[in-house]
Amino acid sequence: MILVGDIGGTNARFAIAIETDNRQIVISDYEKFKTREFTQFDELLKKFVHGIKHKPQKAILAVAGPVKDGKVKFTNQNWLVDNKLIEEKCHISSVDIVNDFAAMAMAVPKVGEEGFIEINRGEAHDTAPILVSGPGTGFGSCILVPQGTSWRTLACEGGHSLFSPRDDTQIEIVKILQRNNPNVSVENFCGGKGLNNLARAVFGLQGYSYQELSPHEILEKSENGEEPFTTICSIRAEAIMSSLANMALVTGARGGVIIAGGVAKHLVNFLSSETALEAFTSVWPHNDMLKNIPIKLLIEPTAPLLGAAAFGFDGN
């Protein structure tokens, strides 16, 4: 029995994971919290622990940010998560902290076909790496490397690489975003935290007076064909796909690209469009490598929890 957690910039999810005799992972006692409602992480975890009947002695937490010596300083939240402090305050014997996209990657072999939406069929190379990446509050990334019958994860920070605009509109948006920050990253352009700035830029370029709406409202209006909301979502989807193509080329991800993250799930209709796929394949138009890479959207909601549990049951 392992307590597993998926802690992002907006939401934190916890559950209990048990491995069956046939090595299947079963998730129970699932609970979701808003991170902004807690000033310290240990307060949040204690609330979950006190609310369940189980008393697990091992925890594996998937956290949004680079992990060093059992500690994570959140990229998009003013928290320091410290495994030793959690062990002491929450009375758990062993706490391991892993990168959230490393957990997402470890879940990929555990999730059935029903947990994915196919965007490009391609042809996977069994011995090649798989890129697991995509936008949530930020933009996470991890490389999943096959090692015989097991897998190894290589957590990386591709979302903090510079965004490369591919047409005149994206160039103009980057120029607007550079007024606040000369270094516009993939996360700045595509991540949830940068949505208001992206929307404001598109409103201005199309001659609309800016109105701040929630991500859900923007998506709803875009699906109804309202402008400039449809343009915002199309630009975002194409930017996500071209950024993933750059990462796939750098990592040699002939094993496939798995698009993950909360934002990606909501943009499925835009990400699966012909124009979005063309934004991916056209990054290297004179070679068939990108055209032949399988692309899937991960939609299984418990994936990071399954992946965290896999670290505990399978190792890495």
Image (cartoon, grey):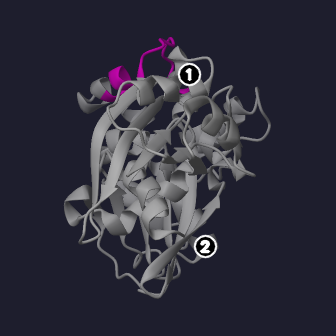
> Is 90 or 97 nearer to us in this picture?
90
Give the residue furthest to the left. Answer: 114
- Would residue 214 appear left or right of 246 to someone viewing this image? left
- Amino acid at the residue labelled 2: Thr
Whether residue 234 is visible here, answered yes or no, is: no
> Is 172 or 85 nearer to us in this picture?
85
Q: Which residue is mark 1?
A: 43
Crowd around label 2: few <14 · some 14–19 · many ≥20 (10 Å): some
Q: Is residue 210 magenta?
A: yes
Q: Mark 1 vs mark 2: which is more N-terminal?
A: 1
Q: Which residue is mark 2?
A: 251
Distance from Cα at disc 1 to Cα at disc 2? 38 Å
Q: Is residue 228 above or below residue 129?
A: above
Q: Is residue 306 magenta?
A: no
Is disc 1 placed on a helix, strand or loop? Answer: helix
Checking the image for residue 285, the label placed there is none
- The residue lying at 69 percent from left, 41 percent from top is 84
- Amino acid at the residue labelled 1: Glu
- The residue lying at 43 percent from left, 30 percent from top is 49
The span shown in magenta is 205-219
Whether residue 65 is visible here, answered yes or no, is: yes
Which percent across, then down, holds residue 72? Answer: 69, 42
Q: Main secondary structure of the magenta part?
A: loop
Q: Is residue 124 above or below residue 203?
A: below
Which percent across, then down, holds residue 232? Answer: 44, 33
